Structures are given as C-alpha cells and as structure tokens.
Image (spheres, grey):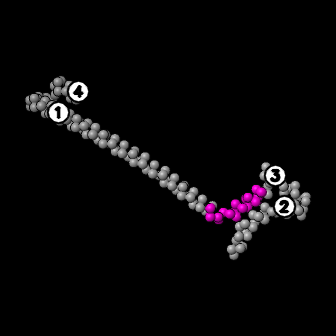
C-alpha cells in the first residue's frame, strides 16, 4: 500500500514531466505541440499543476493551512476584542453623559419645584388679601393681571 501511495504521489508527476519527451521520441510530429511555450513549456505547467493537486495532503501544506486558520482566527479574535473595547469605552462615555444629564435634570426639577412653591405661596397670599365680599363679586383688574402674567 505504501509503495502504491509513493508511486501515486511521486510517480505520476514524474510521468507527466517525462511524458512529453517519451511522446516526442515516439511521435516526432507531436514535438511542436508538446514543446509549445509561453515562456515556460506547457508540459512543465501541467506537471506543476498535477504535482500541486496530488501533493495537497503533504505535511507542510497541512501545517501551513493549520497555521493560516490559526492566524485568521487570531485576527478575528483581535478584531472582536477591539470592537469590544470600543463599545466598552462608548458605554462609559454614555454612562458619564447620563450622570451629567441626571444632575442637570435634578437641578431643573428642583428649580421648578421651588418656583411652583413660590407661586402657590403668592396665590395663597393673594387669596388671603381678598376679602370674602369681593370673592362673591369676582376678580378685580390686579388679580386678572396677576393670573395673566403667571
């Protein structure tokens, strides 16, 4: 079995590489076609492609593929960590902004409560100044002006 695998692994590319020479010896007319070249003879490219196809299971290629997968996974992990850190910083910034907003909101509510209390006291003071006889008659112009202004 080992011998068969060895022949398949190394014999087939060697056969592909030697085939043009054997064929040109047997068929001289095939020489022109088999030795056609771009800058490299086509049979060398075919031999290289066959060797790469048959050699996909080699230990070096497997190790390279494993390392590439690890590098890709590491890069994805680093990218995820960077995104996580950016989101954490954004969350802290938004938390600080929310705290500042709550402090401003508390001040505004305190001012509104103080203003409301002052207005209620002013209304109570004005109502105390109105004698009961005038209450039945209605409001005079100073009372109406006060209500319009507030």
Closest to the observer: 113 or 11?
11
Q: Earlier in the sequence, mark 3 or mark 1?
A: 3
Q: Main secondary structure of the magenta part?
A: helix
Residue displayed at 88% across by 62% down: 25
State the residue position of label 2: 21
| Residue 120: x %, y % from top left | 17, 34
> Which image quadrant for residue 106?
top left
Q: Residue lying furthest bottom in this view?
A: 1
Q: Nearer the viewer, mark 2 or mark 4?
A: 2
State the residue position of label 1: 118
Residue displayed at 76% across by 56% down: 45
| Residue 55: x %, y % from top left | 68, 63
- Distance, label 3 to label 4, CA atoms, is 100 Å
Q: Earlier in the sequence, mark 3 or mark 2?
A: 2
Q: Which residues are magenta?
A: 44-60
Label 4: element kind: helix
Label 1: element kind: helix
| Residue 108: x %, y % from top left | 26, 36
- Distance, label 3 to label 1, CA atoms, is 100 Å
The quarter of the picture where the C terminus appears is top left
Residue 136 visible in rendering: no
State the residue position of label 3: 37
């Amino acid at each position: 079995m080992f011998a068969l695998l060895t022949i398949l692994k190394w014999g087939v590319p060697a056969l592909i590489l030697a085939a043009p020479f054997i064929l040109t010896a047997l068929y001289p007319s095939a020489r022109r076609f088999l030795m056609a070249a771009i800058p490299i003879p086509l049979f060398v490219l075919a031999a290289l492609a066959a060797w790469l196809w048959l050699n996909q299971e080699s230990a070096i290629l497997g190790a390279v593929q494993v390392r590439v997968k690890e590098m890709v996974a590491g890069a994805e992990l680093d990218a995820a960590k960077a995104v996580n850190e950016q989101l954490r910083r954004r969350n802290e910034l938004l938390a600080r902004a929310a705290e500042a907003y709550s402090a401003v909101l508390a001040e505004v509510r305190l001012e509104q409560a103080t203003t409301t209390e002052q207005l209620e006291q002013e209304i109570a003071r004005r109502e105390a100044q109105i004698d009961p006889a005038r209450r039945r008659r209605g409001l005079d112009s100073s009372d109406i002006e006060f209500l319009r202004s507030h």
